[in-house]
Image (tube, rainbow, N blue to C red):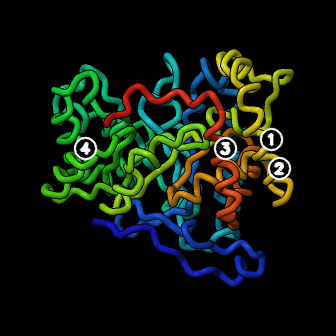
Amino acid sequence: RIERPCLSSPSPLAMLLGTFPLPRTGTFPLAEGVAVSPLGFGTWAWGNRLLWGYDPNLDAQIEAAVQAVMGADGALLGAPPGVFFDTGDSYGTGELEGRAEELLGGYKRARRRPERLVIGTKLAVYPNRLTGKSFEDACRASLQRMQLEQVELVQAHWSAANFQPWQEPALWDGLARCYEGGLARAVGTSNFGPKQLRKVNDYWRDRGVPHTANQVQLSLLSREPLESGVIELCKERGITPIGYSPLCLGLLSGKYSPERLPRGPRGLLFKQLLSQCAPLLDALADVGSRRRKSVSQVAINWCMSKGVLVIVGVRTVEQATDNLGALGWRLSRAEIDELEAVAKRIPVKATQNIFQTA
């Protein structure tokens, strides 16, 4: 199995900038010979009209954001690491399903060094995918959309254990077939708790399939992965833990208030939650003021302090630049304790993914 995350040596430029990797924020392995920086990027919003208000006219804006990410990474972390981009075959609403994969594949192909843009796609566990071959076929369809021969990582978007447990063997077999058929360099999971993670990891280990990643919902308002022990289990077994939704759909970004809400369903949700989360947002702002960092950067850095690869959304250059500011420094133990003490007193928690297993 792939070893636990290790630190890369700082480049002279990074040392000059004072942004070389610090302990617990080094590079993370996702496949043999593939290491990525501690901040990755998600593509859920690409093609999603309902929640994120996607419009095809925004594609140039998204591409510019990706360019900003890929251009900045070398200066921040030195040349070796790649940058992880997470996507899925279900990303995109209605006729736009798969749009995120289409865009991401194009951005990778257009790069002078495409290997630095590391892709992990997730296969939806749709009820009609009942055989290992059906998941293998789904991966081939994803590759066709991306116009690639192989991705670095293919993941189960969720476990079937909660609702269709009879489908779980086909899912495990299907992802193994993706690796064995050369469609992906490694396999991963998402929303698997400790119990289910042990089972699938044992299965793939016995089959000789590298299981290199497990995604969990992690933020100051979603600390269950720390309490369940799944992050520690990942590290024990050489699986890179990936934390998604570090900003709770933007609730912890510091960009919204009861007078300034996002459009669509998020606005309705935030209207109910912002006042209850005010003490935590104030604490994040206080730490950010002392550190000269934004609220988003502090919230993301808290997730990084748990030793996980963190993925955040990327739609604009401004958003990408702000999120990149979470790299190259780390919160002190006292700051972490301060934020967690406030978070524990918040009466609301992030809604958990319904597919999250034990």
Secondary structure under the numbered disc 3 in the rendered image: helix
Instruction: Tell whether label 2 touches label 1 (CB within 8 Å).
Output: yes
Secondary structure under the numbered disc 2 in the rendered image: helix
The numbered disc on residue 175 is 4
Instruction: Tell whether label 1 touches label 4 (CB within 8 Å).
Output: no
State whether residue 269 is above or below residue 207. above
* Residue depicted at 38% across the width and 41% down the height: 190
Disc 3 from disc 4: Cα separation = 30 Å
- Which amino acid type corresponds to the residue marked 4 in the rendered image? Leu
- Which amino acid type corresponds to the residue marked 2 in the rendered image? Asp
Secondary structure under the numbered disc 1 in the rendered image: helix
State whether residue 264 is above or below residue 27. above
Classify 10 Å Cα crowding around label 4: few (below 14), some (14-19), many (20 and above). many
User: What residue would you read off at disc 2?
Assistant: 286
- Which circle's residue, 4 or 1, is located before the other in the chain? 4
Disc 2 from disc 3: Cα separation = 33 Å
The numbered disc on residue 63 is 3
Q: Nearer the viewer, mark 3 or mark 1?
A: 1
State whether residue 200 is above or below residue 81. above
Q: Quadrant of residue 193?
A: top left
- Which circle's residue, 3 or 4, is located before the other in the chain? 3
Q: Position of residue 281 (x, y in %)?
A: 76, 39
- Which circle's residue, 2 or 3, is located before the other in the chain? 3
